[in-house]
Amino acid sequence: MIDVESLLTYEKMYLDRGCRYICGVDEVGRGPLAGPVTVAAYVTDFSRLTEGVNDSKKLSEKKREKLFSELKDKAVCYNVVSLDNNVIDKINILNATKQAMKQAIEGLTVKPDVVLIDAVELDIPYRTHSIIRGDALSYSIAAASIVAKVTRDRFMTELDAVFPEYGFASNKGYGSKKHIEALLKYGPTPLHRKTFIRNFVKDE
């Protein structure tokens, strides 16, 4: 298990500069063929860190679920924003991601002193630091990645009951073999991103 201290390099740098509220921001769902892009903004309480936090992609679903509950309880505050496939089709996935990030930050109950963001550059009225592979290097971003992923995964699992043919509970909207086969056989659902499925559904 990764040592929490190894994920605090950026946080400690800003704490040493007098920052109190450090916010991590990450997204999940940029690549799927269906469903929303989901962003979490997470303000870390450094007196109540959670052991086992890491890039959400490196954790099992069971581990993410456990950490999700603990992280929510221990946060100074957090906020999650999802933008659906219609917004993604209208303004493209990068702009939808940035818009969701801005909304997530704006919806926090405290004003962050600095915002650490996984890879994306944001033009917002806060001090920002974009970190490549930030979800593997920053505790705050890793925490945000877990909160975002569990939130989106739960939503996609709920959709599986509505559209069982597509296997959303297992593929979460990503282009798995079963998902693409269902898309070709049954056509798109109202959750599919038209701009993402043009190679599979020619009429869309």
Image (spheres, helix red, strand yellow):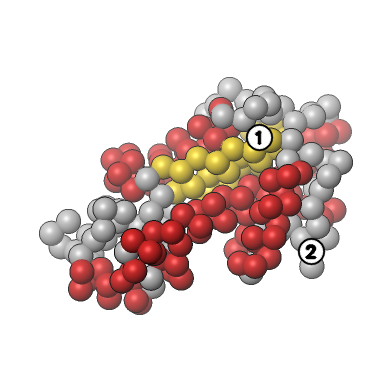
Tell me the quarter of the picture where residue 133 sits: bottom right
> In front: 126, or 84?
84
Residue type, mark 1 in image: Val
Q: Residue furthest left?
A: 203
Classed neighbour count for the residue bearing mark 2: other residues with Cα under 10 Å, few (<14), some (14–19), many (≥20) = few
Name of the residue lying farthest toward the top: 125
Could you tell me which residue is drawn at 20 percent across and 65 percent down?
187
| Secondary structure category for the residue under label 2 | loop
Residue 119 visible within the image: no
The secondary structure type at the circle numbered 1 is strand
At horizontal 79% and vertical 29% (from top left) the residue drawn is 19
Where does residue 5 sit, x and y in percent of width and height?
85, 53
Q: Which badge, 2 or 1, comes first in the chain's sequence?
A: 2
Residue contact at pointers 2 and 1, CB within 8 angstroms: no
Q: Mark 2 points at which residue?
A: 2
Q: Pointer 1: residues within 10 angstroms few (<14), some, or many (20+)?
A: many
Please provide percent x and percent y for residue 72: 69, 45
| Residue 13 locus on image (x, y percent) | 81, 38
For the N terminus, the quadrant is bottom right
Residue found 45% across the figure and 62% down from its top: 157
Q: Where is residue 197 in the image (x, y as percent from the top left)?
A: 26, 60
Q: Say which quadrant the C terminus sits in.
A: bottom left
Horizontal side of 47 relative to 87 (left or right) equals right
Q: Which of 99 and 158 is in front in this view?
A: 158
Q: Nearer the viewer, residue 174 or 187?
A: 187
| Residue closest to the eye, 141 or 182 | 182
Rounded to the nearest angstrom, the CA distance separating label 2 from label 1 is 23 Å
Amino acid under disc 2: Ile
Q: Which residue is drawn at 38% across and 54% down?
A: 35
Task: Using the image, determine if residue 41 lies above or below residue 19.
Answer: below
User: Residue 115 bears which disc, if any?
Assistant: 1
Going by the image, does 164 lie left or right of 101?
left
